[in-house]
Each structure stands twice: as structure tokens, then as C-alpha cells.
Amino acid sequence: MGGGAASAGLEKGLDRPGAQVHCRGMKKGEWAERAVPGAEFALRVTPGARRAELVAGPDGYRCAVTAPPEDGRANKAVAEALAHALGVAKSRLVLVRGAMSRDKLFRLEP
């Protein structure tokens, strides 16, 4: 799906300041119906992946990010990808638990 600038930022992850993290093929706000204040999102995260991906499957949400799991860079990338999918500001997402784990729980604040 497309190559362009969005894809270039996707492949580099958060290696440069201001890099955008968008999941391949996901439009901003594609999951807008799930953006209910107070909603919680449990995700299984794969840091350091070849390409970013955010999917909702029968076993829950899975998110792969290109950012490495160091200095909170992967957590930031996951929050950006989830905010993009929900069509909300990333500042509205709060990491409730899982800062050092692959299993994370985010809550959407009002």
C-alpha cells in the first residue's frame, strides 16, 4: 500500500524527533466509534518490529511498532498509533499499566 512520506516515517519509527507513527493502511480516526471517554484498551505490543501495525483480533488488540523498547520510545509509539486509530490527541491516552511489559493497558481520558 503506497510508499510516500507516511511510509518513510513509519519505517524509521521514532529515530528522529517529530517522526510520525502511523500504522500501515490505517486512516486517522478509523476506530473513532471506540473513542469513548473512560474506555480501556489492553494491547499486546511487539517493539522493534519491521513495520508498524495495529489490529483488533478475536484475542484482543495487537500493536507492532518499529521503535525499540528503550527509554519509553516504544510506549510513545504505541500511544501515537492508538491515538491515530481512534482519531484523538495522544495526550488523552494514559498508560495505566505495563510500562515495562509487552502487555499494556491504556485508558482514554475525557
Image (tube, helix red, strand yellow):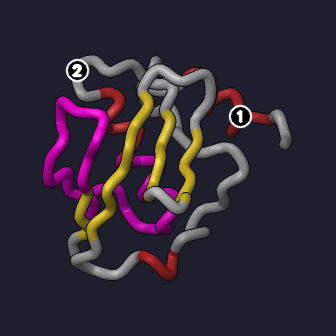
Q: Image quadrant of residue 76?
A: top left
Is residue 21 left or right of 95 when viewed as pictured?
A: right
The N terminus, quarter of image: top right
User: Callout 2: 10 Å neighbours few (<14), some, many (20+)?
Assistant: few
User: Measured along the vertical axis of the image, is residue 32 above or below residue 18?
Assistant: below
User: What SS does tag 1 mark?
Assistant: helix
Which is nearer the eye, 52 or 15? 52
Q: Position of residue 60 (x, y in %)?
A: 44, 58
* Quadrant (top left, top right, bottom left, bottom right) of the C terminus: bottom left
Q: Does 13 appear above or below 6?
A: above
Q: Which residue is mark 2?
A: 71
Query: Pointer 1: residues within 10 angstroms few (<14), some, or many (20+)?
Result: many
Please name whichever residue, 51 or 27, is drawn nearer the observer in this view of the structure: 51
Instruction: Tell whether 76 sits left or right of 20.
Output: left
Q: Residue at x 56, y 53 (%)?
A: 55
- Magenta range: 79-105
Amino acid type of disc 2? Asp
Q: Which residue is mark 1?
A: 7
Say which residue appears at 38% left-offset and 43% top-offset.
44
**Which of the two labelled residues, at mark 2 and mark 1, occupies the earlier sequence position?**
1
| Element at label 2 | loop
Whether residues under marks 2 and 1 lie with C-beta atoms below 8 angstroms apart, the answer is no
**Image point 61% across, 69% down: which residue?**
30
The percent coordinates of residue 14 (x first, y second) are: 45, 26
Name the disc covering residue 61, or none: none
Q: Amino acid at mark 1?
A: Ser
User: Where's residue 95, x and y in %?
Assistant: 20, 51
- The percent coordinates of residue 21 (x first, y second) are 52, 39
Residue with the most extreme front position? 59
- Please tell me whether residue 83 belongs to the stretch shown in magenta: yes
Q: Name the side, left or right, on which 66 lies relative to 108.
A: right
